[in-house]
Amino acid sequence: MTIPYTFRNKKLLDKALTHPSFTKASQVGENDYERLEFFGDSILSMVITELLYKKHINATDSKLSIMHSNLVNSQSLAKVAISINLGKYLIMDEGEEIAGGRDNVKNLENAMEALIAAVYLDSNYETVAAFIKKLWRPLLNDKSIGEKDKKSLLQEWAQRDNGALPIYKIVKREGVAHSPTFTISVTAHDMQAIGIGKSKKEAEQNAATALLSQINELEKKN
C-alpha cells in the first residue's frame, strides 16, 4: 500500500517527508516536517475524537479517552506509517539513513503527523478526515484499543497500597541529537525495571511493561 492521496501541491508532500537531518546537512532552512508535525498532531486528535464519539455511542468519557490515547500514540502512528511504506519515501541525510532512520519509530510517527497536516493544507477537513479514517480503520476495529496502556496499569497497581506513583528516570540517552535512543528506569514498591525506546514515551512504556511482567511472575509464585 502507498499513500492513498494525490497531492496538488507537491511541495507540501516533499516538506512532510523531509527529516530535519536533511535540512541541517544541506542548509536549506526550515523546510522539514517539524512544523507540519505539530499541526498534524492536533488534526489527528480531532478526527479520531469525532470518529470515536460517533462510533461508540454508549462508551463513557473515560473509555473514549483510553481508546483515543491508544489510537494516537507513537506505536499506532508508526503502524500506520509502516502500512503505507512511509519510511521508504523519507528524505534524510546519509548519517540518519545509516543509523536506521527509515525504520525509526519516532521518525515514522513524526512524518505521519506531518503527512496528515500536508493532506489537510492541500485539501480540506472532510478529505483529511476520510484519509485518516481509511488508514486507521484496522486499528479502529481492533478491540484492544479499549485497554489501558502499560503505564496506566502500573500506576494503578502502585497506588493500591500507599498511593505512591511509579518513578521514571532517564538512565541513558544515546545516538545523534535528532534521533536519540532512550534508556529509562521505572521504580515502584522497591521493584525496578528498564525500558529502551526511540522516544521517552516508548522507553517508559517498555519499562512499565517489563516491571508488570516482574509483578505478574511474583504474584504467580505467591
Image (spheres, rainbow, N blue to C red):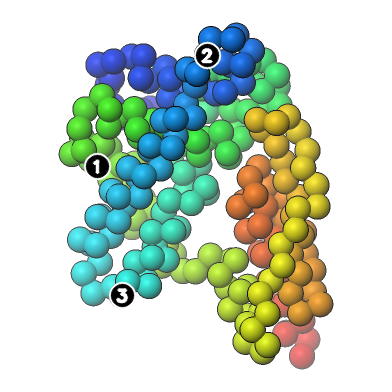
**Label pair 2/1, CB-CB below 8 angstroms:** no
- According to the image, label 3 marks what residue? 60
Residue 29 is tagged as 2
Q: Nearer the viewer, residue 164 or 153?
A: 164
Residue nearest the viewer, comparing 165 with 145: 165
- On the question of residue 78 being in view, the answer is yes
Query: In terms of sequence position, does the residue under pointer 2 or pointer 1 come before the other?
Result: 2
Going from N to C along the chain, the mark reached first, 3 or 1, is 3
In which quadrant of the rendered image does the N terminus lie? top left
In this rendering, the label closer to the viewer, 2 or 1: 2
Residue that appears at 44% across and 30% down: 35
Q: Amino acid at mark 1?
A: Ala
Residue 88 versus residue 196 in the image, above or below: above
Residue at the extreme front = 29
Q: Look at the numbered disc 3 and give the secondary structure of its residue.
A: loop
Quarter of the figure that contains the C terminus: bottom right
Where is 124 relative to 58, above or below?
Answer: above
